[in-house]
Image (cartoon, grey):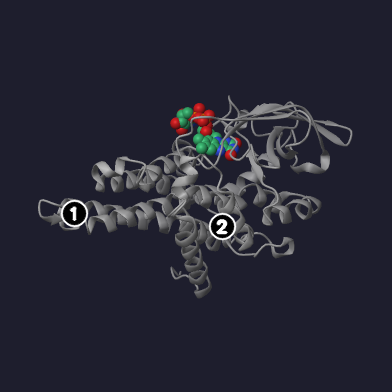
């Protein structure tokens, strides 16, 4: 067992840290305030090859592991969670396509994702099917060489800008996980309508959307995992990718918590009250110690879970533990760091206020905290 990063990983992490601190930090508040997608950051990430870190070299990626990729995500999340999401996203739909799509789909799509020419959103959640993910009713019905897709999706991140959507649909009249599969639906197909959702709390550089598919005709070659009414394979296959995706949300949370912690530590060495620096007050020193313990624990959980996926031995229970712990930790830590700034922390002129809002989404999306507890409990009581 080794907890040491390799020298290549240290280099990768340090380069990402420099990029984040020098290029992304200053404008992080701007994207949030103006609710604008950080297009220039995406271009920079793309130019430097950060959008294909974990993608196969055969399709133009770097062929690195998940631990490597998330060292980068963590550094960027320290300053701007929305920009870090762009690097994280290569491990969502592109990775599902890379693992389960046909060779034709991989050759057609993955180079476009890596080159930043196209994005692919995940259209899974429906108004009546959130945590109960197998309750979806969107349908994909075969018609000659095509499928006809009908249904409604909600909360689709980047649905407004993505060139295509990985749509979870029911390929038959079965119930539950059986019959569910995934199919790529391009945004410009007749019958696709997208509306952005307003009033989002945090990560405001990225939009969530409501989407409608009204008799959308899609070629059968766009199927990624085929739904089969007699089997849950088309549903379970993409789920295996979530062993890493949900830990990725933990790493996003970890990065924001560390960013907030660094700001609080710095402030505490200069702010004085009662003739003392904040960093000399025992109550506050203990709060910082408690936070560091939790940050370190989250880091260990997340990277252990990712290292197991990299080693081909994913542990779904550990992935849920890591996601839950790191995201809940980040909510608490960012709030406690905000507390260190007193009244100043409550205003948007400091990044703390944004950080508190940004991390809030991470205990909801990618499976809520309660859903993770259900997964963990199913490992504690396998037959109940
Ligand atoms: C910012 C953001 C981005 C998102 N991005 C995407 C995306 O890109 N693509 C996509 O498909 N979806 C996305 N989602 C949707 C997200 O995955 C769902 O919101 C999430 O799965 C919860 O579903 P729900 O909102 O319907 O809540 P519900 O399932 O209705 O849950 C409501 C509450 O009940 C709890 N609960 C539900 N069932 C149980 C149970 N069995 N036991 C205990 N507690 C339970 C939940 O934990 C929650 O607290 C996003 C959501 C957000 C907020």
Q: Sequence order check: which comes first, mark 2 or mark 1? A: 1
Foreground pick, 349 / 156:
349
Pick out the residue farthest to the bottom.
7
In the rendered view, does 152 fall on the left or right side of 220? left
Image location (x, y in percent) of residue 104? 81, 52
The residue indicated by pointer 1 is 278
In the rendered view, does 226 fall on the left or right side of 250? right
Neighbourhood count class around disc 1 (C-alpha, 10 Å): few under 14, some 14–19, many 20 upward: many
Q: Mark 2 falls on what kind of element? A: helix
Label pair 2/1, CB-CB below 8 angstroms:
no
Image location (x, y in percent) of residue 279? 20, 57
Q: CA distance from mark 2 to mark 1?
A: 42 Å
Please give the label number shown on residue 309: 2
Residue 202 can be seen in this image: yes
Please give the label number shown on residue 259: none
Q: Quadrant of residue 166?
A: top right
Image location (x, y in percent) of residue 218? 80, 36
374 shown above or below 311: above
Neighbourhood count class around disc 2 (C-alpha, 10 Å): few under 14, some 14–19, many 20 upward: many
In the rendered view, does 13 fall on the left or right side of 167? left
């Amino acid at each position: 067992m080794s907890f040491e990063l390799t020298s290549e990983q240290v280099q990768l992490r340090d380069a990402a840290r420099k990029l984040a601190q020098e290029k992304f930090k200053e404008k992080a508040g701007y994207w949030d305030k103006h609710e604008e997608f950080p297009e220039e950051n995406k271009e920079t990430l793309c130019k430097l090859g950060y959008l294909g870190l974990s993608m196969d070299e055969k399709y133009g990626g770097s062929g690195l592991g998940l631990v490597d990729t998330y060292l980068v995500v963590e550094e960027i999340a320290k300053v701007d969670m929305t920009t870090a999401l762009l690097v994280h996203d290569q491990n969502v739909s592109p990775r599902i396509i890379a693992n389960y799509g046909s060779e034709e789909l991989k050759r057609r799509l993955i180079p476009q994702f890596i080159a930043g020419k196209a994005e692919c959103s995940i259209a899974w959640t429906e108004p009546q099917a959130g945590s109960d993910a197998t309750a979806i009713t969107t349908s994909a019905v075969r018609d000659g060489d095509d499928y006809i897709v009908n249904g409604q999706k909600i909360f689709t991140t980047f649905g407004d800008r993505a060139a295509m959507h990985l749509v979870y649909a029911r390929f038959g009249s079965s119930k539950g996980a059986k019959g569910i599969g995934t199919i790529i639906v391009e945004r410009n197909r007749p019958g696709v309508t997208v509306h952005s959702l307003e009033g989002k709390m945090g990560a405001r550089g990225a939009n969530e959307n409501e989407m409608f598919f009204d008799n959308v005709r899609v070629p059968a070659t766009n199927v990624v995992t085929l739904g089969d009414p007699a089997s849950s394979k088309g549903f379970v296959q993409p789920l295996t990718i979530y062993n890493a995706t949900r830990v990725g949300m933990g790493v996003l949370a970890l990065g924001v918590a560390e960013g907030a912690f660094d700001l609080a530590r710095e402030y505490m060495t200069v702010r004085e009250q009662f003739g003392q620096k904040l960093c000399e007050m025992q109550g506050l020193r203990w709060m910082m110690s408690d936070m560091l313990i939790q940050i370190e624990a989250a880091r260990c959980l997340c990277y252990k879970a990712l290292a197991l996926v990299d080693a081909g031995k994913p542990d779904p229970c550990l992935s849920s533990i890591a996601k839950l712990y790191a995201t809940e930790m980040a909510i608490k830590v960012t709030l406690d760091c905000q507390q260190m700034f007193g009244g100043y922390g409550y205003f948007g002129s400091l990044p703390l206020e944004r950080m508190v809002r940004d991390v809030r989404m991470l205990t909801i999306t990618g499976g809520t905290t309660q859903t993770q507890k259900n997964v963990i409990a199913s490992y504690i009581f396998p037959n109940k």
